[in-house]
Amino acid sequence: MLKTTLKATCLAAVMVLGTPVHAQNAAVVNGQSIPSALVDFIMAEQEKRGQAASPEMRATIRQELINQEVMKQEAVKKGLGSSPEVKYQVQMMNQAILANALREDFYKNTKLTDKEVETAYAEIAKMMGGSEFRASHILVEQEAEAKAIIDQLGKGGKFADIAKAKSKDPGSAPNGGDLDWANPNSFVPEFSQAMVGLKKGEYTKTPVKSQFGYHVILLADTRQATPPKLEEIRPQLEQKMINDKWEEYQGKLLSGAKVK
């Protein structure tokens, strides 16, 4: 795996950086120089991937570059460099490498202000705040089935037992229909509206229809939601914000490009 990665790194480095003529050389292959700076660059890339720098690594990189140079020269002799397939592959690799370089440069130089982060956190805290609900439900396909279950509950049937026996929701049925604590926004609107209208211990007296079927909903409890503190989620939040900025930047580039 390391050898494969090293081959790819060496190839990518040669394509992007080329081989400067006026430089201290690590090797000269049939008159074509391999600069020491190229070896240094690949060493640094390998270190970023967690590989410890060593004389052995430098020797391996040098030899891999020599191997690639010999193969390249032979390919040129055979005229392979002029084939459309090779040209397209080289073009695609150059595009991918440069596009990735742009992305890395964007991430490296994009800075977030404390105000930006705090504003984004306030929006998240608002969404995660409010009340949380502990509800259970029984999901069936037909309205008549849901009505029969409501009648059964009215006669003293246990909600959890009926859910285990009849609910079509594979995620909650084994747990007696329990959906755990959740924000109302986690559910489809029809479900949420019916759930928040219940009092603790109540269940819906009429079936609730949604895209999934017919629900009988039991509200077990409610509590005030407590969003995580900013410092607890700051790394993930900042990463998401930069990702969003990158998507926005790409969109601007694409919208500004003249494509015929």
Image (cartoon, rainbow, N blue to C red):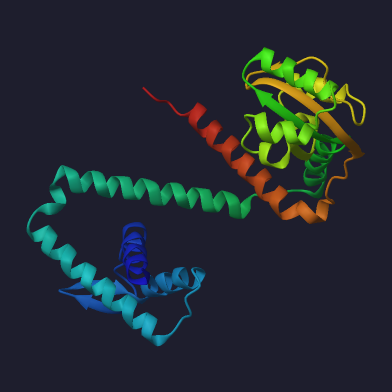
Query: Which image quadrant: the C terminus?
Result: top left
Which residue lies at the image location 30% right of the left edge and 66% below the top edge? 19
Residue 8 appears anywhere in the view: yes
Q: Quadrant of the N terminus?
A: bottom left
Is 11 drawn above or below residue 102 in the view shown? below
Q: Residue at x 81, y 28 (%)?
A: 157
| Vertical comparison of 194 with 135: above or below | above
Front residue (pair 23, 94): 94
Q: Residue 52, percent across and down?
A: 48, 80
Identify the residue at the far front of this view.
155
Task: Quadrant for residue 165, please give it.
Answer: top right
Query: Residue 198 at x, y = what percent?
Result: 89, 24
Q: In the displayed structure, would residue 10 be above or below residue 87?
A: below
Judging depth in this view, the residue of 133 and 232 nearest the camera is: 133
Counting from the top left corner in percent of width and height, residue 142 is at: 63, 15
Which of 8/109 is in front? 8
Residue 111 at least partly seen? no
Q: Residue 46 at what x, y percent from top left? A: 44, 71
